[in-house]
Image (spheres, coloured by chain):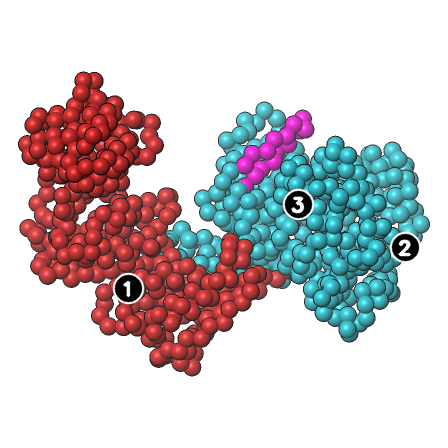
Chain colours: A red, B cyan
Amino acid sequence: MNFVCDRVAVTDAVGIVQKAVASRSTLPVLEGILIKASEGRVVLTGNDLEIGIECVIAADVSAPGKVVVNSNLFGTAVRKMTGDTITVKMLPNNAVSIKCGNSEIKLNGINAEEFPEIPKFETEFDIVLSQREFKSLIRHTIFAVGTNEAKLILTGCLLEASGNNVNMVAVDGFRLALKKVVTEESSVSGYFGDVSLVIPAKTLRELNNIIVDRDDKIIIKCSQKNVRFEFDNVVFTSRLLEGDFIEYKKIIPTEFKTKITADLKSLIEAVDRASIIITNEINKSPLIMKISGGEIRILCETGAGAVDEVVPVEMTGADIEIGFNNKYLLEALKAAEGDRVNLDFIGPINPCLITPYEGDDFKFIVLPVRLRTDVSMDV
Amino acid sequence: MERVILHSDLNNFYASVECLYKPELRDRPVAVGGDVEARHGIILAKNYHAKKYGIITGEALWQARQKCKDLIVLPPDYKKYLKFSKLARDIYADYTDRVESFGLDENWLDITGSVHLFGDGKKVADEIRERIKFELSITASVGVSFNKIFAKLGSDIKKPDATTVITRENFKEVVWNLPVNELLYVGRSTHKKLRGYGIKTIGDLANTPVKYLEYWLGKWGYMLWTFANGYDTSPVSNIAAKSFIKSIGNSTTAPRDLVSNDDVKITVYVLSESVAARLRLNGFKCNTVQIYVRDNGLESFERQGELEMPTSNSDVIAKKALDLFEKNYNWDKPIRSMGVRACNLVLTGDTQMSFLPEYIKEQKEDALERAVDDIRRRFGHYSIGRGLMLCDSRLSNLNPKDDHVIFPISYL
């Protein structure tokens, strides 16, 4: 193997594939990246068996070949070298020579045959949307993903595509986030049914770090067990979560007793300030929202102090007093967009629905906290 | 503002109450002891005449009889004690709403907010003692101080029927010469450790650099050091007693030896119902269940296991306890006593609603158990029960929750 390529392109590519490299593993080969040179191009691959990322860069290849090197060492080496182009050459016993300017660094590598293969699969249809749209789907839902490993299916986001609509949904049991984008062309090409898959949250977080807010396309292909994202010079493969996602449509309420519209920024600031005194697990109590007479009063009292906030709102329907976990409420409001936001309520122990003032881009549901009725101490 | 805290301790509580009902015994050595027939044979309380013979709370009845062969042992009647405990707390409630129980016979009162109404700490303490003596015909000793720890020490210094005031000015003379195990939460093992480092008195403890104490005892070291120096700031409130609770457990010596899994099941359910009811009463859920098993050769062991999510549900606790039991016991010998304990407690707090079916189920069952609590509170413990309890009424005829008494640790 022998090739010459742009040093910055290699550095960037290592930065991307490194996201799929295990930082510490019992198998040294999993801490490495596969470098594979063929006619006119070099493919770098990271694979921690959960996700696999391949990144292609242009190169002047004089001898094809492949080898695995430690990802961290290789990445640091090319980053710290100075010069525009680097020459990578295979030495005997899987060693690799990296030359750039006046420096040469030799790294010991591992036989490429030991590197695990990324699952390959053919599909009949693609889901296509812009990177900007995909990023928005992630950003509006990822906060509500479950963290309980006992409910594995809820540690991922549900992606649904049908016609021009692509939805992403996250539910952790206490709240729900749904984001909808409408694509210009049909999102599902070559297929007329609906598609739904559950993508692990970790995969989405890594993707969110790689893709950028651009109109460039991202193509999603899936099999029963795996999903592949193709964009720019990257192919990102991940396993899917298997099982039945919660039937989320059933838990979105449609009839309400109290409806309000509030200025989003004021509401976020008020909830944020009311959370100041929730300092730890002990100094923790729910935010109490008292909605009446055209305002929301947000009260919170813990061992650290008490906060009283008033936010004026437009309101229809009955007065209500309801308690919330401050974090759930704040994260939902922060993910909301627009100047104003709608909050709809049914009762003090029923879900609260947060929607945009106009349109139906997103739906967030936060379940309340049942406020404690007095605990009596009668012996 | 300087706090004014009282600690009222009803003297020889069980024995004093018993003597009220049987005045002919007043001048004889009397002890309240466990039910010998049901094999709970230990001394729970004694009067001053019995104390003269050196009888100690917690020792076996036969040991006590060796010290005093005329000792009159009465079976405990918790209904009476609960009644008197309640009457005493009604008196305290005339002076403040900040009353924290510590067992049936001890209470802290924070009267900081009412001194302008009733006079200073000593005046209120004396008045309370007089009223208890006059209205209940039993006596109390009361400690008055600026924190809970010293108030409790104060009530121990002079007994019976006395008030002891410990101030910021005099606490070094009054408190620091006392043996260190008089301090609340210095139990047997902590005392042994401290003795090993040459710490004999509370003053020794107060003057030991806190970093050594932390090194020897962990965070308790710091806690005890603040206690000894009068820096304790823990509040008195009618629910604050919870903050000291680390686990809730019940155990019982069965009226007959348990010989089968069915026997164990009845006993475990009786104990678990009590543990769960007490968790709910105190606003806790547990993450861990522990069992204690002692066979009729008096060999014992403990095992514990984690729950999937915090609970105060008796069925969940009992199932976990039975699971632990079945995995760890092979019936070499019949069983004499068993215990179930809920540990790793979290405050129940407010209930976060959920979409998930298991949470919804848990919340429904919680509501069911609370309804049972309410029925039992209104109509008595045996007014409602599981069908299982009818299988062997001798084993199930037990109400550990109401029979259970929390002994202040410093008394053990």
Is residue B260 within the magenta segment?
no
Q: Residue type at mark 1?
A: Lys
- Tell me the crowding category of disc 3: few under 14, some 14 to 19, or many 20 or more residues within 10 angstroms, Cα based: some
Residue closer to the observer: B138 or A342:
A342
Closer to the chain start, of discs 3 and 2, is 2
Q: CA distance from mark 3 to mark 1?
A: 50 Å
Q: Which residues are magenta?
A: B289-304
- Picture residue at 73% right of the left edge, 63% below the top: B3
Label 1 resides on the chain identified as: A
Pick the quarter of the image with the C terminus of chain A.
Answer: bottom right
Residue B337 rendering spot, x and y as whole percentages: 65, 35
Please say whether residue B294 is one of the residues in the magenta stretch: yes
Marks 3/2: CA–CA distance? 47 Å
Nearer the viewer's eye, disc 1 or disc 2? 1
- B387 horizontally vs A202: left or right: right
Task: From the viewer's side, name the closer residue of B346 and A71.
Answer: A71
Question: Residue A305 location, x and y as percent?
Answer: 55, 65
Foreground residue among A197 and A32 = A32
* Secondary structure at numbered mark 2: helix
Residue underneath mark 2: B23
